[in-house]
Image (spheres, rainbow, N blue to C red):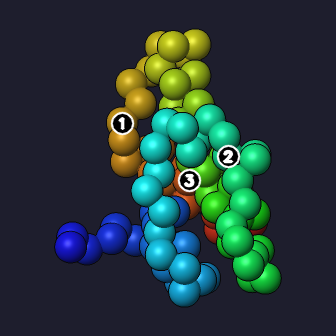
Amino acid sequence: MGKTKPGTPKLIWQKTTTRAWPNVTMGLIRGTMALTFEDNSSKDSERLQILILMTIWAIWKSRNKNTILDLEAVPSETRDTLKELIRDLI
């Protein structure tokens, strides 16, 4: 199993719950707001919803930079945006 990169949603998940990181698919992303875990006493479903939505927002901001401002958006900037969003939340 590969090492998880710092600041990624998966690493945040691993630091905040003992539940295994779920297989994130397009179906899971589309149904994010309906997501619930059985025995959700630690609010893991809410945490996962927030992580998925923050990731989508970071990607959206990069997309806007590229299409609206006609500037190159590199993946590291998207990752940095996500880190900022998570840092602001915490």
Distance in Å between CA atoms under marks 1 and 2:
26 Å
Residue drawn at (55%, 73%) of the image: 13
Query: The disc labelled 3 sits on which kind of residue?
Result: Leu
Q: Nearer the viewer, residue 46 or 5?
A: 46
From where the camera sits, is residue 45 visible? yes
Question: Which label is found at residue 32?
Answer: 2
The vertical placement of 18 against 56, above or below, is below
Q: Which residue is mark 1?
A: 74
Q: Which residue is mark 3?
A: 82
Element carrying mark 3: helix
Task: Please indicate whether residue 75 sits to the left or right of residue 16 in the image.
Answer: left
The amino acid pointed to by label 1 is Val
Viewer-nearest residue: 53 or 82: 53
> What amino acid is found at the position of numbered circle 2 in the picture?
Thr
The crowd level at tag 1 (other Cα within 10 Å; few <14, some 14-19, many 20+) is: few
Residue 12 figure quarter: bottom right
Q: Which comes sooner in the sequence, label 3 or label 2?
A: 2
- Number of residue marks: 3
Residue 90 location (% of width, % of height): 72, 73
Quadrant of res 64:
top right
- Tell which circle, 1 or 3, labels the residue nearer the N-terminal end: 1
Residue at point 56%, 45% (across, down)? 28
Percent x, y for residue 46?
A: 75, 63
